[in-house]
Image (cartoon, rainbow, N blue to C red):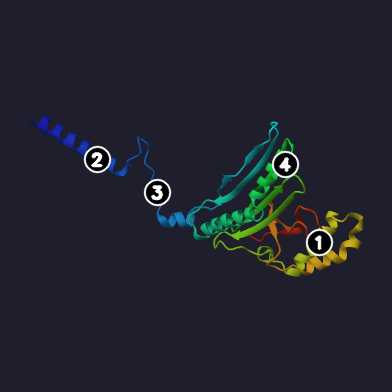
């Protein structure tokens, strides 16, 4: 009788233990080891927002003529999405999505499609036209993230290649000016920029011929309108938009500032 009672007790304990374990396992676990999740506050405060991935939308098309000739239109948006639960991260991602769409729509792929269709019907062959936006993280620190958006547009004639830099405060999600992230004054930034143009040899032996126009451009700069990025080493570079006098040309120019780094 004692043996039977002992077996019943043992069976009951095993049954209770079994139901207890099932209660902690998710319904779709399928044999996987349960993982204990952190509290909401730990998610918000302790998850480092240093990871990111890319989200893409592809609008590419191939146009084929009567003789089999082809023109490919490479068209897409590839934007950065930061990983994290913080309000600042969410705000940054929202800004990047809006910026990528606006940047892409400034030119509009429909015009490239029409050009490709016309050109392929008139015998043009083996061409690749472009209308895309690509975002890349150039710097990720403990306080700031810097992201560069590059627009590439080409439809058989002159191509345009423009860049825009944005630097965000990871905690607040707000954009930061070049003076805020470096701790330098606007006059110091301008001086470093002029030296960067000289040392970079952008006007070759004709710097003096362009110096007046350069100074006129520099006079238009203020902390809010200076377009810049931070590179992987923490150095700051100013981006001059395409078709900006006296630089001209259909591509933006990045001018690194000597000994100017982000202040983390």
> Tag 3 or tag 4, which sits nearer the N-term?
3
| Mark 4 and mark 1: Cα distance apart in space | 32 Å
Q: Which mark is residue 25?
A: none
Left or right: 31, with 67 as reference point: left
Q: Given contact means CB atoms under 8 Å apart, are the residues at marks 3 and 2 in contact?
A: no
Q: Quadrant of the C terminus?
A: bottom right
Question: Mark 2 Cα within 10 Å, few/some/many (few <14, many 20+)?
Answer: few
Left or right: 140, with 216 as reference point: left
Q: SS at mark 4?
A: helix
- Of residues 244 and 59, the one drawn nearer to the viewer in this rendering: 59
Q: SS at mark 2?
A: helix
- Of residues 72 and 208, the one drawn nearer to the viewer in this rendering: 72
Q: Is residue 184 visible?
A: yes
Q: Residue at x 81, y 61 (%)?
A: 245
Q: Which residue is mark 4?
A: 119
Q: Nearer the viewer, mark 4 or mark 3?
A: 4
| Mark 3 and mark 2: Cα distance apart in space | 21 Å
29 to 255, vertically: above or below: above
184 to 206, vertically: above or below: below
Give coordinates of residue 218: x percent, y percent.
Answer: 79, 66
| Mark 1 and mark 3: Cα distance apart in space | 56 Å
Q: Which mark is residue 19?
A: 2
Q: Which residue is mark 1?
A: 245
Q: SS at mark 3?
A: loop
> Tag 1 or tag 2, which sits nearer the N-term?
2
| Mark 4 and mark 3: Cα distance apart in space | 58 Å
> Tag 2 or tag 4, which sits nearer the N-term?
2
Q: Which mark is residue 37?
A: 3
């Amino acid at each position: 009788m004692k043996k039977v009672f002992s077996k019943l007790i043992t069976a009951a304990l095993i049954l209770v233990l079994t139901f207890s374990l099932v209660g902690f396992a998710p319904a779709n676990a399928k044999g996987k080891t349960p993982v204990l999740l952190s509290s909401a506050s730990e998610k918000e405060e302790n998850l480092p927002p240093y990871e990111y991935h890319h989200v893409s939308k592809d609008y590419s098309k191939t146009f084929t003529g009567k003789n089999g000739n082809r023109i490919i239109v490479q068209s897409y948006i590839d934007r950065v999405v930061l990983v994290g639960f913080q309000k600042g991260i969410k705000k940054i991602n929202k800004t990047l999505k809006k910026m990528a769409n606006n940047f892409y729509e400034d030119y509009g792929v429909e015009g490239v499609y029409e050009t490709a269709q016309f050109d392929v019907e008139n015998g043009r062959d083996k061409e690749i036209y472009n209308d895309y936006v690509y975002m890349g993280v150039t710097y990720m620190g403990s306080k700031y993230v810097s992201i560069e958006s590059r627009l590439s547009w080409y439809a058989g004639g002159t191509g345009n290649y423009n860049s825009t830099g944005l630097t965000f405060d990871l905690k607040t999600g707000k954009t930061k000016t070049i003076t805020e992230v470096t701790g330098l004054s606007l006059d110091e930034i301008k001086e470093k920029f002029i030296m960067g143009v000289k040392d970079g040899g952008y006007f070759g032996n004709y710097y003096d011929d362009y110096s007046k126009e350069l100074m006129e451009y520099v006079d238009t700069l203020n902390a809010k309108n200076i377009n810049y990025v931070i590179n992987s080493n923490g150095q700051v570079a100013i981006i001059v938009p395409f078709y900006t006098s006296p630089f001209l040309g259909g591509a933006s120019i990045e001018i690194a500032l000597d000994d100017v780094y982000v202040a983390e």
